[in-house]
Structures are given as C-alpha cells and as structure tokens.
Image (cartoon, grey):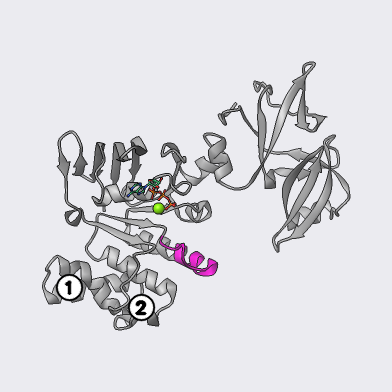
C-alpha cells in the first residue's frame, strides 16, 4: 500500500472549472474521507486518479509512482494504474457468481487459472465471504454484495482503494454495519483508502483524516476528526459537520447584545473578540440550561429521542435548538413546553460576514 498525492490539479469541463490548483494527500495505510456538497468535484477527483479524465495542470503520485504529470506529459493509462474501486452504481455484476466477480480483474490481467482461483479466494476470505463463492449476487444481502465489491477492489493487490459513495443505496442499519466492516477490513490489511461521501456522519465514523471541500471545488480543511470538530477552519466547516445555531451579535453603547429581534445583553464575549458584524455559532449540545443565567428563553417544544431530548426554544424573536442528554435532563430536571428557562452557551464560535473565524 502507498500514499496518494494530488498536487496543483486543475480539471475543467469546457468552460466549467471543477477545481483548480487542488492539492491533497492520503497517507499510506489510512482512510481519508473526502466530504463535500453534491457537485463540488469529488467524483471528478476520483476519475482523475483512475485515469478517466485528464487534468489540465498538476501531478498525481501513488507511492513513488507518478501516474500523471501535466508538465512532463506523464499519463499512465487507466488499466495500468493499479487502483481498486468500489462505486455506488458499479457494485457487482448480477450475471456472474461471487467468485467470477472477484476473479474478473485478474482475468483481465491474463493471470493463470490457478493463481486467479487462489487470489480470488484469498480476497473473499479477507471479507469473510468464502462460503458464498458460488452464489449469485441476487442471493446475497446488500451488505454482502458490497463486501464482494470490496474483495474485487482488493484482489489485484491495489496500491490504493477508492470508494465513491459505496453505501449510499443501503438502509441505515446496513450502512452502519458496512462502515464497521470497511474499517475492520482496512485495519486488517493496512489498506490506503480514499473514501468519498457527502455524508459527514459516515465520514466521522470511518476516517483517520477528513478533507472537506467547498461547493466551488476548493479544499477548506483537512485534519483528524477532532481537528475538524473542535477547530473548524471557518463557518462552512462548522455548519457542515453537525447542526448548529447561529445568532447575530451587535454592539451598542459599548455593550454587546444577542440580536434576536430584541436585544439581549450578552456578557460572555471572550477577550479579543470584537462583536461588531459578527455572529455566534453554537452546537445544539453546547446550549445548556442554567437557572442562574440572565439569558432566558421560552421552551416551544420538546421531543424525546431515546438517549437525548431535542428542544426548540424561542430566544427573543429567534428560534434556537438545544440537545440535552438524558443524564443532563435528570440532573437539571424536566423542562416543559411553555416554561422560561435560563441558558448558557459553551464553546461559542464567532464568525464575520464572510464566515471567517473572528
Ligand atoms: N462529464 C462531464 N461533463 C461536464 N460537466 C461535468 C461532467 N462530470 C461532472 N461535471 C460537472 O462537474 C461538477 C462536479 O461533478 P462531480 O460529479 O465531480 O461532483 P460530486 O462532488 O461527485 O457530486 P455528488 O456528491 O453529487 O456525487 C458538477 O458541476 C458536474 O455537473
Ligand atoms: Mg460523486
């Protein structure tokens, strides 16, 4: 397995620039999840890696091997790139048995029969599917089919495996299982995986590192899940990972207020932050009930979700959302719709009009 480096890549479809000067590294033996809104260019990047489109500028390197270099006119053909793929709409071939599916890439490489059989069985063993070798895909569950697709991606000893939205079509429970499965297979094999998704929850569950793309194809942050959650680079990242409240601030006569249709005095501004033109972002579970707090809101609704309560509160003329664990609910006591309740904001972040951190 090897690392993957994209450097200064530009891909255009006639007039439309999908991304330009794009750089990213997937470290060897890690899962990097590339996350971004629909249409930002994730699949375009995958296609560039696979050799299915030709970037205008930049280089793509896997380990020591240069697959693409615009300046030096290097462009290794797709079939020689040695990259495993698992696509959402490119799962398994329905007319072939499991073993035939997994053997296919080796057949294309014209390996001898015995080697094909041995390597295909080994790949099936890695995903715990040997006993299904002679089944047809229609006789397998969605998750089992996806495991076959993973075995097929691994069978040629690929340097790297790319998974582009591989589990989007599965139901929620199966998706969860597949994420665990992919993680376990990856750990067992030490594989390098570039995993593409627009679902940040699966990315958080799966990744060693996560890269977040903006709609315009630029990369806004790359880091561990902790980096991304605790130190989001800007408002876009903060908002992309989890639901949040945003409350505008204003300053009058030297005092700071929450600007919620009516002005609510706000005394907890951290030193060094100028509130003018800023808004405050707070995660749902960082709004806490506190009877001592001078900031009061009215509960408009409460929903019990098993391990937590979801509240809607009316703060001045704004609606805000709060998540409270059942444990906190027990400590604090129940708050019912219609009640006034004091609130405090933990870990607030301050953004200017352009979404940059204050
Ligand atoms: N063959 C093509 N010709 C012209 N434009 C294309 C082509 N393929 C993709 N695009 C455009 O390039 C942009 C990026 O597309 P891409 O498929 O890479 O997005 P994505 O991030 O994978 O989105 P999704 O999450 O929906 O899969 C989109 O605006 C898309 O319309
Ligand atoms: Mg895509």
Q: Is residue 2 visible?
A: no
Asked if residue 42 is positioned above or below residue 354 in the image, the reply reads below
Q: Which residues are magenta?
A: 166-179
**Residue drawn at the location 32% of the way across and 50% of the way down:** 46
Residue beneath label 1, please? Answer: 116
Task: Identify the mark at residue 137; answer none if there is no mark.
Answer: 2
Q: Is residue 6 left or right of residue 228?
A: left
Residue situated furthest front in the rendering: 15
**Residue drawn at the location 76% of the way across and 43% of the way down:** 319
Q: Is residue 313 left or right of residue 98?
A: right
Sort mark 2 into few (<14), some (14-19) or many (20+) by Cα contacts within 10 Å.
many
**Residue drawn at the location 50% of the way across and 54% of the way down:** 199
Q: Is residue 182 visible?
A: yes
Q: Position of residue 30 (x, y in %)?
A: 36, 51
**Residue drawn at the location 33% of the way across and 52% of the way down:** 29
Task: Identify the mark at residue 50; answer none if there is no mark.
Answer: none
Residue nearest the viewer, comparing 287 with 220: 220
Q: For ligand 2, tell me if the residue under mark 2 lies within 8 Å.
A: no
Secondary structure of residue under mark 1: helix
């Amino acid at each position: 397995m090897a690392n993957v480096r994209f450097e200064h890549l530009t891909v255009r479809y006639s007039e439309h620039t999908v991304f330009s000067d794009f750089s990213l590294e997937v470290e060897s033996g890690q899962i990097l999840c590339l996350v971004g809104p629909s249409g930002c260019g994730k699949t375009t990047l995958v296609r560039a890696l696979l050799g299915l489109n030709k970037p205008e500028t930049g280089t793509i390197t896997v380990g020591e091997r240069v697959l693409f270099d615009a300046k030096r006119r290097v462009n290794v053909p797709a079939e020689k790139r040695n990259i495993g793929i698992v696509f959402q709409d490119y799962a398994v071939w329905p007319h072939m048995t499991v073993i035939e599916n997994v053997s296919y890439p080796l057949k294309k490489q014209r390996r001898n029969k015995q080697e094909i059989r041995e390597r295909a069985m080994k790949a099936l063993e890695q995903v715990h599917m040997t006993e299904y070798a002679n089944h047809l895909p229609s006789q397998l569950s969605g998750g089992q089919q996806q495991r076959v697709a993973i075995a097929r991606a691994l069978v040629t000893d690929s340097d790297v495996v790319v998974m582009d939205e591989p589990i989007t079509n599965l139901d929620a429970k199966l998706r969860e299982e597949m994420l665990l499965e992919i993680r376990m297979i990856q750990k067992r094999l030490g594989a390098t995986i570039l995993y593409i998704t627009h679902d940040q929850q699966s990315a958080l569950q799966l990744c060693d590192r996560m890269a977040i793309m903006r709609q315009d194809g630029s990369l806004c942050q790359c880091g561990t899940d902790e980096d991304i959650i605790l130190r989001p680079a800007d408002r876009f990242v903060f908002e992309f990972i989890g639901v949040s409240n945003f409350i505008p601030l204003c300053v009058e006569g030297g005092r700071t207020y929450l600007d919620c249709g009516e002005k609510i005095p706000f005394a907890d501004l951290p030193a060094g932050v100028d509130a003018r033109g800023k808004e405050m972002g707070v995660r749902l579970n960082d709004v806490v009930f506190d009877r001592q707090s001078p900031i009061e809101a009215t509960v408009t609704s409460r929903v019990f979700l098993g391990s937590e309560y979801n509240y809607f509160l009316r703060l001045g003329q704004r609606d805000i959302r709060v998540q409270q664990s059942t444990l906190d609910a027990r400590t604090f006591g129940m708050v019912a719709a219609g009640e006034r309740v004091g609130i405090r904001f933990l870990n607030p972040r301050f953004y200017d009009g352009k979404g940059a951190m204050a």
